Amino acid sequence: MISPRYRAQIGVFAATSVFIVAFMIVVAGAFEQPQERQGLAGSPAASFRLPDLDGNIVSFSSLRGSVMVLCFNPSPTSNSSIDDAKRLAELGQKYSAGNDVKLVQIYTGADATAKDEMSQIQARATDAGNHCTTLLDPTSRISQRYAVQDTPTFFVIDSSGIIRYRGGIDDSSADAPLAATNFTSMIDLLLAEKPLPGQPEPAVLSNIK
């Protein structure tokens, strides 16, 4: 039987490992050249390499080839984060049979060394279910590359890596998410490989939610 002290030591080691990995990614990312208009509907999605809760690195390229849903989350203690995690779990159940939709939630600014915060993020990962991957963006570098100004912000990205929707999960207007159809309808259209109705060119930043 593992003693409480030993379990605590394992937890500290895991948190430290995640922090070190995240720091190395930040240093490497400092040399990347930003692309124009990233984060806007109709533009290529920004690539990323971020740690999951076990310290494993998940890359954008490993998720390509499927329709991808990215959710940039608020604080894991907020009611919105709890609700959105449960909605991601529902999406995971809906699309799990075909395995053609990759669900990813990203916690921006998360401190991997803060035990309470990591505990809350782990709880939200459990809420989001087994079909959703939870990643950490401790320096907010990736959220900046997606021009995320408010959280939660959802993105739907097609199999070729183009952003087709950004906005709220319940947003059905064409203006706010910069797409001509709502969130789940966009996922279904991409899975069916049907033409997208009136997909706009990248819009000005003032329209970003």
Image (cartoon, grey):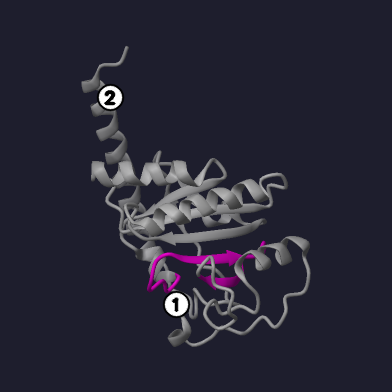
The kind of residue tagged 2 is Arg
Q: Residues within 10 Å of mark 1 (few under 14, many from 20)?
A: some
**Against 7, is 144 above or below?**
below
Vertical relation: 122 (above or below) 4: below
Can you give x and y, in whole percent of width and height, for residue 57 in the image? Answer: 45, 46
Q: Position of residue 125 (x, y in %)?
A: 44, 44
Looking at the image, which residue is at 68% across and 47% down? 99
- Mark 2, residues whose alpha carbon is within 10 Å: few (<14), some, or many (≥20)? few
In the image, 5 versus 13, the foreground residue is 5
Gap between marks 1 and 2 measured at Cα: 42 Å
Three-letter amino acid code of the residue under disc 1: Lys
Residue identifier under label 1 = 209
Q: Disc 2 designates what residue?
A: 7
Q: Quadrant of the C terminus?
A: bottom left
Q: State which mark lies toward you, 1 or 2.
A: 1
How far across and how far down the image is residue 176, in percent?
Answer: 52, 80
Quarter of the picture holding the N terminus: top left
| Residue bounds of the magenta highlight | 146-167
SS assignment at label 2: helix
Q: CB under 8 Å between callouts 1 and 2?
A: no
Side (left or right) of 135 relative to 140 = right
Residue in front for this viewpoint, 138 or 192: 192
At 49% from the left and 50% from the top, the residue drawn is 86
Using residue 30 as the reference point, say whether residue 58 is left or right of it.
Answer: right
Res. 162 mark:
none
Give residue 138's quadrant in the image: bottom left
